[in-house]
Image: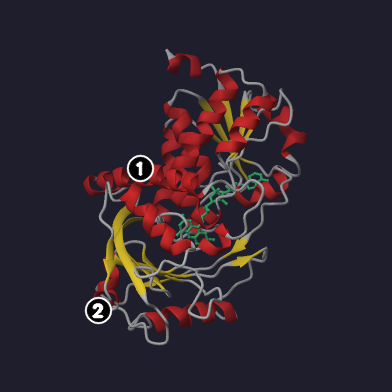
């Protein structure tokens, strides 16, 4: 019955990244007609952000913790909300891991993630991303996977931390996603389920194009999942780029085949923000090494020779020996746009949870006849999807 009702409605999703495709998948399964518009798609030649990503699932706040947690913007949600979204995604990726074991399609697998910290939180938690992460992660996450605190011997058994003041750590199982595979899977899946894809660059404020897009696609509502594109499309100055880079190399030794190593961005022993070390096996052959976190940098001109890329590589090789081998924006009652952007460095971690919230918002507008302003008030309090 609900499915039949939904078949009368069409949703236009803007964005062919993980946020747009996950949202489209849920909408299609609920019976909606879906069109997806994007100026770029994941592929072999041109790569969009969702494909470039690591992509490691992390319990929020993750590796980019300082930049995401310490630069709260108006539309910033509560940490607890990010954690809920992340756990929804976690359970989804676990299913994908099981599916992949029978028939490898999605490209998800569980690895052991070693997280290291500059301060010893076991004795005297100093606040900040890392200690909070462990406390709350234990509440949510230990239902599914055990979190092991590392003693110094174990923590540093397989890695060489000389030169780094690393005092403490823990390890747990975490999903890692081979984004080349997963994006291809998602693209094929939504098309097989009936989504119509169109390549189009929408210029300027989306509100100026709203009527024309709804007419063109005979759509009832628009979901804006345009990632950084939302800076212009949603005319949202709070959306800013966080430039990153990762290197992909062959896996140099056994330990790194199934183990990831992360030194999240945090305050170091001298209380200065430190840089990230991100070493993640994306599949049996490829190791992803990162990362750089540069706020407000729009340039796409990084090369292997860029000083920050060389520094990133040096941090990783120092750390591990042998390496060198939503908010809804409804300005008026008639507005038909729901936004799903602004995931920072955690788009894969939050993707599934945010997609579910986004679909709920779409349904609120489509079926509950909520006026724009009412929905807006409720939604802003709850989500930043
Ligand atoms: C180096 C790096 C490493 C990362 N590692 C991780 C990680 O380990 N774990 C994790 O969870 N996250 C990670 N991330 C973050 C993650 O990649 C992003 O949060 C996520 O990909 C955002 O997905 P998205 O679908 O919202 O946006 P995108 O992937 O950017 O997709 C946006 C889509 O919208 C389209 N679009 C934009 N503007 C317009 C327009 N005007 N008209 C039409 N279409 C438009 C684009 O063409 C594209 O199809 C990393 C990011 C980087 C850069």
Q: In this orientation, which residue lies closer to the viewer: 83 or 122?
A: 122
Label annotation for residue 293 = none
Q: Can you tell which of label 1 and label 2 is closer to the viewer? A: 2
Identify which residue is drawn at 67% across, 63% down: 296
Residue 75 visible to an observer of this rendering: yes
As drawn, is 247 to the left or to the right of 375? Answer: left
Query: Residue 123 lies in what quarter of the image?
Result: bottom left
User: What SS does tag 1 mark?
Assistant: helix
Circle 2 residue: 153
Quadrant position of the N terminus in the picture: top left
User: What SS does tag 2 mark?
Assistant: helix
Identify which residue is drawn at 69% across, 27% down: 373
Query: Residue 333 lies in what quarter of the image?
Result: top right
Q: Residue furthest front?
A: 124
Q: Residue 317: x percent and y percent? A: 41, 82
**How many labels were placed on the picture?**
2
Distance from label 1 to label 2 (Cα)?
Answer: 34 Å
As drawn, is 68 to the left or to the right of 170? Answer: right
Circle 1 residue: 92
As drawn, is 78 to the left or to the right of 58? Answer: right
Q: Is residue 333 above or below residue 38?
A: above
Q: Residue 106: x percent and y percent? A: 35, 48
């Amino acid at each position: 019955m609900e499915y039949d009702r939904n078949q009368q409605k069409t949703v236009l999703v803007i964005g062919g990244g993980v946020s747009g495709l996950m949202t489209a998948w849920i909408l299609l399964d609920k019976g909606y007609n879906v069109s997806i518009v994007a100026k770029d798609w994941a592929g072999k030649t041109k790569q969009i952000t969702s494909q470039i990503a690591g992509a490691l699932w992390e319990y929020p706040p993750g590796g980019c913790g300082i930049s995401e947690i310490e630069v709260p913007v108006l539309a910033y949600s509560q940490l607890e909300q990010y954690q809920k979204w992340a756990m929804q995604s976690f359970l989804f990726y676990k299913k994908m891991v099981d599916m992949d074991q029978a028939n490898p399609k999605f490209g998800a697998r569980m690895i052991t993630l070693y997280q290291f910290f500059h301060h010893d939180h076991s004795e005297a938690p100093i606040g900040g991303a890392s200690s909070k992460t462990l406390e709350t992660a234990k509440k949510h996450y230990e239902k599914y996977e055990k979190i092991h605190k590392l003693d110094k011997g174990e923590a540093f058994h397989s890695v060489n931390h000389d030169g780094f003041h690393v005092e403490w750590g823990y390890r747990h199982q975490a999903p890692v996603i081979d984004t080349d595979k997963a994006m291809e899977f998602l693209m094929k899946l939504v098309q097989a389920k009936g989504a119509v894809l169109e390549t189009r660059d929408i210029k300027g404020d989306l509100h100026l194009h709203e009527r024309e897009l709804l007419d063109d696609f005979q759509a009832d509502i628009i979901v804006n999942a345009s990632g950084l594109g939302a800076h212009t499309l949603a005319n949202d100055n709070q959306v800013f780029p966080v430039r990153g880079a990762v290197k992909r190399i062959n896996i140099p030794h056994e330990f790194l085949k199934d183990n990831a190593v992360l030194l999240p961005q945090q305050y170091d022993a001298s209380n200065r923000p430190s840089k990230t070390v991100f070493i993640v096996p994306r599949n049996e052959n490829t190791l992803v090494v990162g990362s750089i976190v540069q706020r407000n940098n729009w340039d796409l001109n990084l090369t292997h020779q860029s000083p920050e890329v060389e520094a990133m590589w040096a941090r990783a090789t120092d750390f591990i020996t042998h390496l060198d081998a939503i908010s809804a924006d409804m300005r008026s009652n008639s507005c038909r746009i729901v936004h799903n952007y602004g995931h920072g460095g955690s788009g894969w971690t939050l993707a599934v949870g945010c997609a579910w919230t986004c679909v709920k918002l779409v349904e609120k507008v489509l079926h509950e006849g909520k006026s724009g302003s009412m929905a807006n008030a409720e939604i802003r309090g709850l989500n930043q999807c």
